[in-house]
Amino acid sequence: MEKFEKFTGVVCAVDRANIDTDALIPKEHLKSIKRTGFGPALFSDWRYNEDGSDNAEFILNQPKAKGASILVGRNNFGCGSSREHAVWAVAQQGFKVVIAPLEGDIPGFADIFRNNCSKNGVLTVQLSSADVDKIFELADADEPLEATVDLEEQSVTFGEHIFKFDVEQAVKEKLLLGLDDIGESLMFVEDIESFETEHNAQLLSA
């Protein structure tokens, strides 16, 4: 997993709440046994017409969202099934960050989706509803909207607008170091090998 570094990217704002994992990647795209090639399937039901051509009305196909790396949605983003393919599709489309609002008791993200994101190098940022409303207002312009994401400072900056966010310290450290669960385990490979050697010796002598 690559280290998460401060970057400036283009925003793609999808103004819908409760975007579930079936909307992110419909079930017909789950047949592959590989973990690659899911990017084109992201939002496929909204992104493409029935004949397979691009739906010009969908934001991801519009010029102002070309090369977008920051995805913005409404609350309860990633609800539905636990399919990790949804996060693979988001990441393989080129998104490094997903932003959604906390609205009352409704979280920005479904827990499983948020956890899957952190394990695949995607940062989830939960802001207030007012902050996200402002982002959608800015994104409504005809020109591409850019933002700078600084995980170290825990901020997202849109010109003069700076939004601060909270992130679990463990998630922050793993993203900054580029560590997934396997990578984190490999940091202790010598201890693991030592334990296995001692453990196996005890079994053999039993």
Image (tube, rainbow, N blue to C red):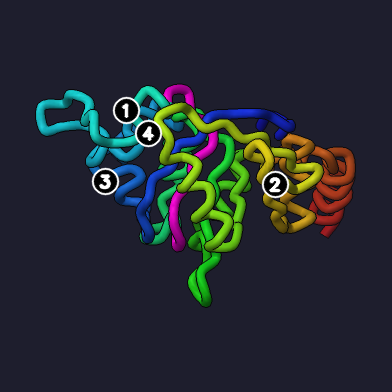
Label 2 neighbour load within 10 Å: few <14, some 14-19, many 20+: some
Q: Is residue 67 magenta?
A: yes
Whether residue 36 sits left or right of residue 173 in the image: it is left
Q: Which residue is mark 3?
A: 27
The image shows a total of numbered marks equal to 4
Q: Which residue is mark 2?
A: 162
CA separation in Å, label 2 and label 3 = 38 Å
Amino acid carrying label 4: it is: Ile
CA separation in Å, label 4 and label 1 = 27 Å
Whether residue 127 sits left or right of residue 79 in the image: it is right
Q: Residue at x 60, y 57 (%)?
A: 126
Whether residue 156 sits left or right of residue 13 in the image: it is right
Of callouts 2 and 4, the N-terminal one: 4
Of callouts 1 and 3, the N-terminal one: 3
CA separation in Å, label 1 and label 3 = 22 Å
- 196 or 91: nearer the eye? 91
> Which corner quadrant of the image does residue 38 belong to?
top left
Of callouts 1 and 2, the N-terminal one: 1
